[in-house]
Amino acid sequence: ARPRWRPVLLGALDLMQTVPAFAYLIPLLLLFGFGPVVGLIASAIYATPPMVRNTMLGLDRVPAAISEAGLMSGCTRRQQFWQVEVPTALPQLLVGFNQTTMAALSMVIVAAIIGGFEDIGWEVLSSMRKAEFGQSILSGLVIALLAILIDRLTIGFAKAPETGPTRAMQWMTPRRLAMTLAIALALAVVIRLAMPDATLLPQTGLRMQMGAVNQWLLGLVRDYAWFFNGVRNSVLYCLLLPLRVGISGSATPAMWGFSLPPSVLAAYVALVLALSGLAAHRFGWRAAVAALAAGLILYTGFLDLPWPVFILAVALLAAQVCGPRLGLFAVAGFGLILVNGLWPQLVQSLYLCTLAVLLCLLVGGALGTWAAHSDRVSRILKPICDALQTMPQFVFLIPALMFFKVGEFTALIAIMLYAIVPPIRYVEHGLRHVRADVVEAVEQMGATPMQTLLQAKLPLALPVVMLGLNQTIMAALSMLAIAALVGTRDLGQAVYVALGKADAGMGLVAGLSIAFLAILADRLLQSWAGGANAANDRRDPG
């Protein structure tokens, strides 16, 4: 109704979705103290944006013909809204309700931390504190199953009706549904009147019988500690540390067994320049600059990358892709982080999230491609993705801690478990919805299945894949505050430490720094996806 307020509202929604909950818990705790009220407010802040965004989208997509028909029928503005626009936008509103419910369920453990009720979130948290891995995983699965059930129900209501009634619809008519609900309600009243003091609950829950599972898991970790330690050390010394301190810092006798002589350094520089020249010849100057930047980062590492060079490069990229406003926004955001002394934490966050996103794209993209070409694989992956997407973030720390102990590798595993779902879902969705006539034309020209995938399907599905990359980055950044619990030294740890000290200022600054990274990445990828979509439209105007 008021378009001029839309940018302000969208900015507020971006902050509500990207600032870690731990950051705004500090002022809430100072204002209201511990208790369920703070958990309710924090959950509402985190869960409201999906409903608002879907409401705006649904009302924006009401066909003009329907709105004009309502006006021509003599509807007042209120009647037009409630009797024409809202019913038309109802499927999209139900999608918003679905996403809001999922977001609220994901906050149950955060609410338990700050003094909520003894609910299922408290069960997960208390089990984690006691190192009862079986009970904590089982409690987390309960939350996931509840979220999946609500997801299926709301998505079912949101779907458009089929062309004809299905067998289930023919059996469960509205009349039979009403009669079944009435019988169930009457039965509940009778049982309550007949046995007013009975709880009708089992004396011992299944989670109390998980001691054997805990012992089995601990025995597995103990017997195969050599394997888990080998995996952790291999990734740590061959991947994590080189990215953090660079080849110049990793090539030491203590770490790799050798140093970096001038001849090897010269060969490395020549290799980077050769790759940059090849990229310029095949893909243009942007690819050449990207190759040079990757070579510099790989040599110096994220920690030793000069901050003026980094800020200038990102600002120029933002200005080139999205215009000067985003470039100034990047300079202002990085300047705020720099003057607040959070630059080392920012670099740690960037290095950890960059590695997690790249690995998620590699593994998740491969699984999504496989699922797009195999219905059986798609059916197997769907419940797994549902569980990973609806499981509270704290639960991802349980298997990572159990097998790999505290450290950056554990944080990487936890982030990947949470962020791997978007590339799987979006890659599969994008490949499955490529126009069939285009694929058939490419195949009739004699293309192999690999050529069809790389030269036809993936380029056409690129906008959808880019949205998946966007969501992967958002998920990785949202896990920083959770990963700080297992020993990282990034912006998430700054938020967590500020929470422990009740330092509202530093907590908000660190939380806003994470939000800044998320918003900057979102705007860059949106522009990139829009450019890819426009390029596809130009290639295929029909």
Image: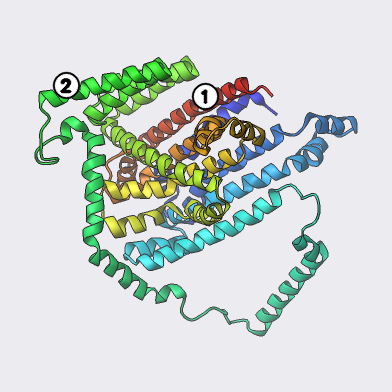
Label 1 packing within 10 angstroms: few (<14), some (14-19), many (20+): some
The residue lying furthest to the right in this view is 73
In the figure, is residue 502 to the left or right of 99? left
Element class at badge 2: helix
Element class at badge 1: helix
Q: Nearer the viewer, residue 344 or 287?
A: 287
Q: Amino acid at mark 2?
A: Ala
**Residue 158 higher or lower than 54, as above or below:** below
Residue ID for mark 1: 527
Residue 323: % across, % down: 49, 16
**Residue 218 higher or lower than 91, as above or below:** below
Quarter location, residue 402: bottom left
**Residue 67 higher or lower than 315, as above or below:** below
Q: CB under 8 Å between callouts 2 and 1?
A: no
In the figure, is residue 383 to the left or right of 33? right
Quarter location, residue 190: bottom right
Residue that appears at 43% across and 34% down: 515
Residue 500: % across, % down: 31, 48
Residue ID for mark 2: 266
